[in-house]
Amino acid sequence: MRIISGKYKGRRLSPPKNLPVRPTTDMSKEALFNILNNHFTFAELSVLDLFAGTGNISFEFASRGSEPIVSVDADYGCVSFIKKTATEFDFNITALKSDVFSFLARTKGNYDIVFADPPYGMEQKEFEKVVTLIFENELLAEDGMLIVEHSKHTHLEQLPNFSFQKNYGGSVFSFFEWENDEEHEED
C-alpha cells in the first residue's frame, strides 16, 4: 500500500497482515482521486472515511492537505494502525472505533467528502442504509460528494441523490451529490 500523491507521494505503508480488510487498489485509488481532482481543491477539505480499514483513503486525502479527517472502523487493529500512522506523519486524522451505523445515527457534522468502503459481502439494504443515513442526517456539505465503493453485484444507482458511477475491475465507485439544495437548507 502506498500514498500516490501529495506531500508523502510514494511512501509505502505496511499495515499488519491480520487486519480484516480489502484495501482499495492503487489503480482504483488513483482513478478515484483523478475524478475528485476535477471537482475539488484538496487543501482544507473535511473528510469522513467510513469502514476505513487500513486508512488507505484517509492517508491519501491527508497527504494532499485535506483536514480534518475522521476515520471510522469497527476493528480495533485498524483504528490502532490509523492512529499510529497519523501520528507518525503528523496527519490531522481522528480515528474512531465504532460500528458505522451507530456512528452515523448519532454523529453531527458536515463533510465535504464522505467515502464509504463497506465489506463487499454486506447486504444490498445495508449499502442503501449507509447512503440514506448520510443524507437524512445531513452529514454531506452542500457542494460535497459521497463516494461508495462496492462490487459490481451491488446496485445503488436507483437511490436518491445518485450522480454517476465508475467501474474499475471488480470495484465500482458510486457518487452521490445533493440533487436539490433547498431540500437540506435550514428554514
Image (spheres, rainbow, N blue to C red):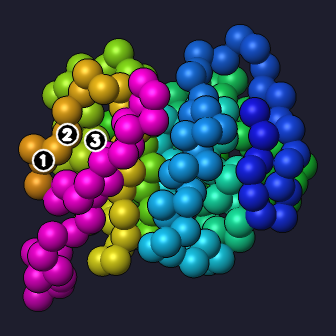
Q: Is residue 104 above or below residue 172?
A: below
Residue 2 pos. (x, y %)? 78, 40
Query: Which label is found at residue 156?
Result: 2
Numbered tag placed on residue 43 in the rendering = none
The Cα atoms of the two marked residues, 1 and 3, are separated by: 11 Å
24 sits left or right of 119 in the view: right
Task: State the residue in front, 19 or 74.
Answer: 19
Dot 2 lies on which element?
loop
Question: What residue is disc 1 on?
Answer: 159
Front label number (3 vs 2): 2
**In x, y percent, where is residue 56?**
66, 41
Task: Give the amino acid at mark 3.
Answer: Val
- Looking at the rendering, the stretch of residues picked out in magenta corresponds to 161-187
* Residue at numbered disc 3: 130
Mark 3: few/some/many CA within 10 Å (<14, 14-19, 20+)? some
Q: Is residue 118 visible?
A: no
Q: Helix, strand or loop at disc 1? A: loop
Q: Is residue 146 visible?
A: yes
At x 30% / y 48%, what residue is drawn? 165
**Label located before the other in sequence (1 or 3):** 3
Which image quarter is the C terminus in?
bottom left
Q: Is the C-beta separation of discs 1 and 2 under 8 Å?
A: yes
Q: Residue at x 57, y 78 (%)?
A: 41
Position of residue 65 measured from the top left corner of the image (x, y, whole percent): 71, 70
Tell me which amino acid carries mark 2: Leu
Taking depth in this image into account, of 90 and 40 the one nearest to the observer is: 40
